[in-house]
Image (tube, helix red, strand yellow):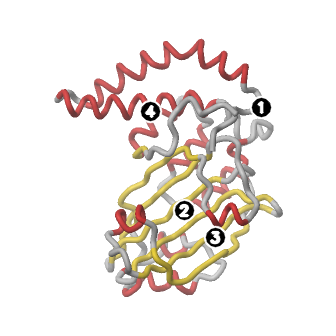
């Protein structure tokens, strides 16, 4: 089995993602991934149907290390964890995990505990809602345990988003994983999407170069924008022929190491 020849599992802020991906994704799909409003409403617009939401788990749990770091949760402090899936019929399009610290539940966010099968966007973007303070996007081959228990596997990287929202009582985090059956990966549904799985290679390379050059710019005291623009243009030019060869060899999608 071949190893993945580019890095995944690296989070990119919205500015980096916009610069590196806007030219390579179908506009509707790019807008879906970068949308700062209700993802349920955006699904309706892009897919043309109202997705069905099913609550998988909800209750007090201990957050992961990353979740604790992002939300400033102490190691043995409980949080409300809510996991849902969204899709159409037997197709699962999205898996979402919401982490709400206990102090956040003391305010308007306490309504999340009573959502049942309703989308969380009704609270986040409704009256007395929350402000989204950050949005990051990544490609990942890691499948959460709940998704694995659903029998879902993937042989190509999946898009994932992570958002921090803030109520007056405190923050919460929502992570959204676009599952393999989601139409954004389909090359057949040309009405809504002309995005091929193999294009992930070019996008990921561009994003990695932009991230590396941004760090180098900080070390050298240069402006990030100038360095990223120059480096990205050179990288896309150098990799254009090699990318075409890679796409030819991997028409059915590359193999990735576990």
Eyeballing the image, is 233 above or below 214? Answer: above
Under tag 1, what secondary structure?
loop
Question: Which residue, given by chain and number where applicable, does mark 3 sit on?
Answer: 84
In terms of depth relative to the viewer, which is nearer, 140 or 26?
140
Mark number for residue 208?
4
Mark found first going from the N terminus, 1 or 2: 2
Nearer the observer: mark 3 or 1; the answer is 1
Distance of label 3 from label 2 (alpha carbons): 15 Å
Mark found first going from the N terminus, 3 or 1: 3
Asked whether, in this view, residue 219 is left or right of residue 12, the answer is left
Asked whether, in this view, residue 87 is left or right of residue 240, the answer is right
Count of picture labels: 4
Position in image of residue 69 (x %, y %): 35, 64
Mark found first going from the N terminus, 4 or 1: 4
Question: Which residue, given by chain and number where applicable, does mark 1 sit on?
Answer: 252
Question: Which residue, given by chain and number where applicable, does mark 2 sit on?
Answer: 38
Mark found first going from the N terminus, 2 or 4: 2
Mark found first going from the N terminus, 3 or 2: 2
Distance of label 3 from label 1 (alpha carbons): 30 Å
Distance of label 2 from label 4 (alpha carbons): 28 Å
Q: Do the numbered discs 1 and 2 sit on residues whose CB atoms are within 8 Å? A: no
Nearer the observer: mark 2 or 4; the answer is 4
Eyeballing the image, is 85 above or below 58? Answer: above
């Amino acid at each position: 089995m071949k190893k993945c020849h580019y890095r995944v599992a690296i989070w990119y802020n919205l500015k980096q993602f916009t610069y590196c991906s806007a030219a390579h994704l179908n506009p509707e799909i790019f807008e879906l991934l970068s949308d700062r409003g209700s993802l349920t409403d955006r699904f309706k617009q892009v897919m043309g149907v109202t997705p069905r939401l099913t609550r998988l788990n909800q209750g007090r749990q201990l957050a992961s290390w990353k979740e604790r770091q992002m939300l400033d949760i102490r190691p043995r402090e409980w949080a409300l964890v809510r996991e849902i899936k969204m899709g159409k019929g037997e197709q699962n399009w999205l898996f979402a995990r919401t982490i709400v610290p206990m102090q956040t539940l003391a305010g308007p966010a306490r309504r999340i505990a009573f959502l049942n099968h309703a989308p969380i966007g009704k609270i986040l973007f409704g009256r007395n809602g929350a402000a989204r303070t950050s949005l990051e996007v990544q490609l990942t081959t890691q499948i959460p345990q709940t998704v694995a228990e659903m029998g879902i596997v993937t042989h190509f990287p999946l898009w994932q988003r992570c958002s921090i929202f803030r109520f007056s009582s405190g923050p919460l985090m929502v992570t959204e994983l676009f599952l393999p059956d989601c139409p954004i990966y389909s090359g057949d549904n040309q009405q809504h999407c002309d995005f091929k799985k193999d294009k992930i290679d070019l996008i990921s390379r561009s994003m990695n170069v932009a991230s590396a050059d941004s760090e180098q710019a900080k070390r050298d005291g240069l402006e990030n924008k100038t360095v990223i623009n120059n480096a990205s243009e050179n990288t896309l030019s150098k990799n254009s022929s090699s990318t075409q060869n890679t796409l030819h060899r991997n028409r059915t999608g590359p193999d990735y190491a576990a």
